[in-house]
Image (tube, rainbow, N blue to C red):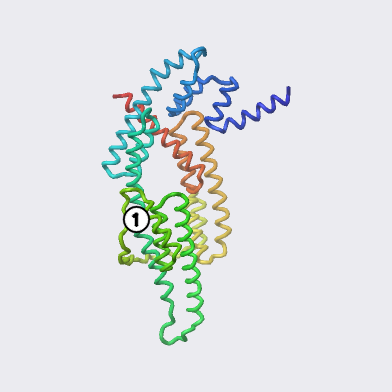
Amino acid sequence: MMKSVIYLCLALLVSACAGKRGDDFRVSLGLVSAYDTAQTSFHQGLIMEPRERLLTISQDDEDYKKAQKFLKQELEPARLKLLRYYAQKGKSEEKKKNWAKAEEAYRMAAELSQQPEALKSYQRRVNLKVRQVRFDDLYDKQKIEDETWKNWKESYVPPMGLYGDDEVFSLVRMDIIKGFDLHSAQTWSRAQTYEKKDVPELAWLYADAYLRLSPGDKKAQDLKNAMKTAVPRGFRLPKDEGSVSKAKVTKAAKTPLDTTHVKGLMTQGKWVEAKLEALSLRKQGNQEADKLLEKIDGKIAELAEDSYQKGNLAFRSEKIDAAVKFWQRAVDLKPNEQTYMDSLRRGKQIQERLGALKIEGKQ
């Protein structure tokens, strides 16, 4: 008997962190009703998940009548209001050429619709715009970057007055060649990666860039030709590689850095700024930089995790606005932490839904 209780407690502990699966598990054990779980999800800004749960309640269930009433009087009206909101938002953002926002809005509307085909069609159309804008900008930047590397590779020639094999110039040239080779390898790796991810326009872009660095390479030319036929209909690829405009580089005046300034930022609690300054010190070869960075990174990780957990606590208390603020702080501190980013994105979506329902309710 004791083993069974222990097993049940462990199962509940695991399921508590498993979202919908955890709710399904608790419902299946009879620890909470499907109706109560649907209400909780609905008040957290979810729509289709509680709707699906309510529809599974059988007619012989004591909660059936309540579930049907809740479905018809609250959940369905909310679903339709949000559906209209996201569909209208998609059209509005599309008119303003905010392609990514329009795509997201159409996707959200499609998820709320019982007949999502038309909305998915809109989403695909706008997705093509998103991909085109991304491609065009990356293509221009990639050409500039490649030409810069090629120019660097050929630029370190000893001037008049030095031997042709001047040791300093030779060492710098060797470093540049190593960097050029690494850049070439990374470019080819990106081409292969995007081919596997089925993003043909980006595979084409990086195959084209590799040919710019290694003219005549057969494998890159074959990949480029294959990707040209694989891009979506209506997608525009450049016809011929044009001349590369030279990027204007302006040198900003640099203020000398020292550890005193970094420590001052740490004392003020400006940890992100302190990290940037410490990284600059490290590039300058400052011997204290590594120790400072270790302390800064540790404090940033501590503060970010604290904000993340406070966000989770606020979310469980249905304080969505507070949760979003805490999660935003966590992301500001550690922008590459996927868990923090996912929570913030989910929180903002729920925040937007709840706000949309309030607006619709006043009309």
Dot 1 alpha-carbon crowd within 10 angstroms: few under 14, some 14 to 19, many 20 or more: few
Would you place residue 353 above or below residue 225 in this image?
Answer: above
Q: Nearer the viewer, residue 249 or 94?
A: 94
Would you place residue 319 above or below residue 169 in this image?
Answer: above
Would you place residue 208 above or below residue 197 in this image?
Answer: below
> Residue 112 vs residue 291: left or right?
left
Would you place residue 206 above or below residue 47 in this image?
Answer: below
**What percent of the width, then of the height, locates residue 167?**
51, 81
Q: Identify the secondary structure beneath mark 1.
A: helix
Residue closest to the far left? 95
For the residue marked with disc 1, what is the amino acid? Answer: Asp
Point 47% across, 35% down: residue:
323
Total tally of numbered discs in the picture: 1
Q: Nearer the viewer, residue 291 or 161?
A: 161
Q: Quadrant of the N terminus?
A: top right
Point 38% across, 34% down: residue:
108
> Residue 236 vs residue 186: left or right?
left
**What percent of the width, then of the height, locates residue 260?**
51, 60
**What percent of the width, then of the height, locates residue 307?**
51, 40
| Residue at which label 1 appears | 137
Q: Nearer the viewer, residue 220 or 209?
A: 220
Tell me where residue 107 sits by quadrant: top left
Q: Quadrant of the C terminus?
A: top left
**What percent of the width, then of the height, locates residue 81?**
34, 26
